[in-house]
Amino acid sequence: MARRKLSTGSIPGHFRALAIPAAIGMVFTTLYNVVDVYYAGKLSTDAQAGLALSFQVFFLFIALGFGLSTAMGALVGNALGEESGEEGEIAAQGLAFAALVSALGILVAWFAAPLLIRLISEPGAYRDAAVQYLRLLIFAIPAFLVSYGANGILAAQGDTKSMQYANVAAFFANLALNPLFIFGLGPWEGIGFNGIALSTLLSQSGVMAFILWRVFRSDAMQGPRTFRPIPARFAEIAGQALPASFAMIVMMIAGFVVQYFLKGFGGAAVAAYGVSLRIEQLLLLPAFGLTNALLPIVSQNYGARNFDRVREAVRFCFAAGVALMLMASCILWFAAGPALRLFSADPELVEIGKGYLHVDGFILPVYVLLFSINSILQAFKRPGLTVWIGVYRQGIGVALFVWLCVRVFDLGVTGVWYGIATAVVTGLVLSLVIVERLARQKIGGLFTGPREPEGVPG
């Protein structure tokens, strides 16, 4: 598979070529999750609440996969831009790293996941459902981690279509397997709620196999490579991946904080938050597509020292992303109620979910700017800065502002939504300051440049 050279040619053209397949793939990933929520709702509200809880815990491992994906995108992308010839070794070491972390992840999750579930929930049917579900789902950890890392290698070469194809196939597989495993067929009665986990395990294993096949046929893997662990390479990959993963884990911790406050309002509030997040993800898909495309474009051009093209790419992403999210906000305001009723007939769940989605609609443009800044920091090989932004926005900010709104101002469940929104907006202000200061060192500035970089090593 020939790679796409992102250091030349039309910037908008590269965004179209990378972002559209990525967004389509994410549409089907989100629809994949929607199928899970839909069939959990066919069982009970407790099943939906259990699914929401288990997702918060499993998100730890999704975060590790995300970190590995962005690490491979940045490291392989920079190597391609520099034309150093090291991309094959970096890619092979990334896959070996993913396999090792996957094995350790299963071991840790087997013992730790039930403890985390008990920490953020009250005793009851929805907690029991979440624990049983996770006991099976943890065996899908390698499928997620390896496919995420492998996809980072493909994205660095300008290939976002492979994951699009895989996600489309996984959606249809999940659509067929969920009812089969939940309700059974003929004399077999199925396995109930755990059938959702089994469907995920099988369909995501198929994604992993396909993406690996595409990676091994790609240009980056045709040069020198070794899968035997090289400590220096593992350290480089971990240094790039772990901060990005930790930033995502901080996001998960924010989810725990939100769940902690929501549990006082009952299972319907917990379920409403989980369903609303799925709807929010659908509307954020164009933003994810754009910002995922931004990482390889900035990585290759930064490696090739095409700093004007870096600035052009960032500004295009900001403008296009904000425009798209303003349209999504209008859709969300009018469609929140009907969308929620697709997943649940519980009027309390629908009313609580509408409150979240109406507040969330005002901050969708803020999210696309935050995602863009994270991609820029990754491409500049400074993922540690995303951690500090995340610690404030998703840790300190969420805990502080939700506490103020719920406990001090006594705004009820709506106070949780206001607290989240305040943390997101103030986090953007911090992010803009940080990325501009770094950009002045690296490329002479994003918004105040161009001028000569200050030459501070990254």
Image (spheres, rainbow, N blue to C red):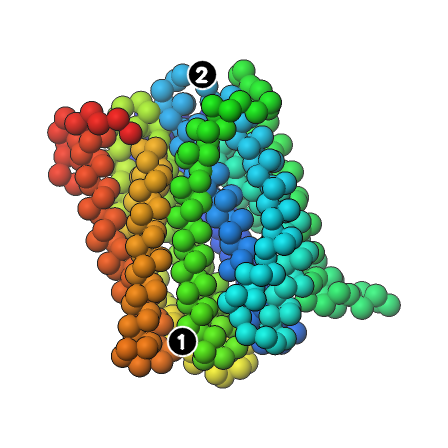
User: Nearer the N terminus, badge 1 or badge 2?
Assistant: 2
Q: How crowded is mark 1: few (under 14 residues within 10 Å), some or many (20 or more)?
A: many
Residue 244 image point, x, y percent: 41, 43
For the residues labelled 1 and 2, say whether their Cβ atoms are less than 8 Å apart. no
Q: Is residue 218 visible?
A: no
Tell me: 320 left or right of 127. Answer: left
Quadrant of the drawing holding the C terminus: top left
Residue pictured at 44% horizontal, 40% vertical: 242
Q: What residue type is labelled 1?
A: Lys
Eyeballing the image, is 376 above or below 269? above
Q: Residues within 10 Å of mark 2 (few under 14, many from 20)?
A: some
Residue 311 image point, x, y percent: 23, 36
Residue denoted by label 1: 354
Residue pictured at 59% horizontal, 57% vertical: 113
Tell me: 274 left or right of 357. Answer: right
Q: Is mark 2 on a helix, strand or loop?
A: loop
Image quadrant in which you'd find residue 214: top right
Residue 69 image point, x, y percent: 47, 39
Query: Mark on residue 277?
Result: none
| The furthest residue to the bottom | 347
Residue pictured at 53% horizontal, 41% vertical: 148
Residue denoted by label 2: 85
Eyeballing the image, is 78 above or below 223? below
Quadrant of the drawing holding the N terminus: top right
Residue pictured at 40% horizontal, 60% vertical: 254
Q: Which of 444 and 10 is in front in this view?
A: 444
Q: What residue type is labelled 2?
A: Gly
Q: Can residue 124 be seen in this view?
A: yes
Residue 444 image point, x, y percent: 17, 31
Q: Nearer the viewer, residue 220 or 241?
A: 241
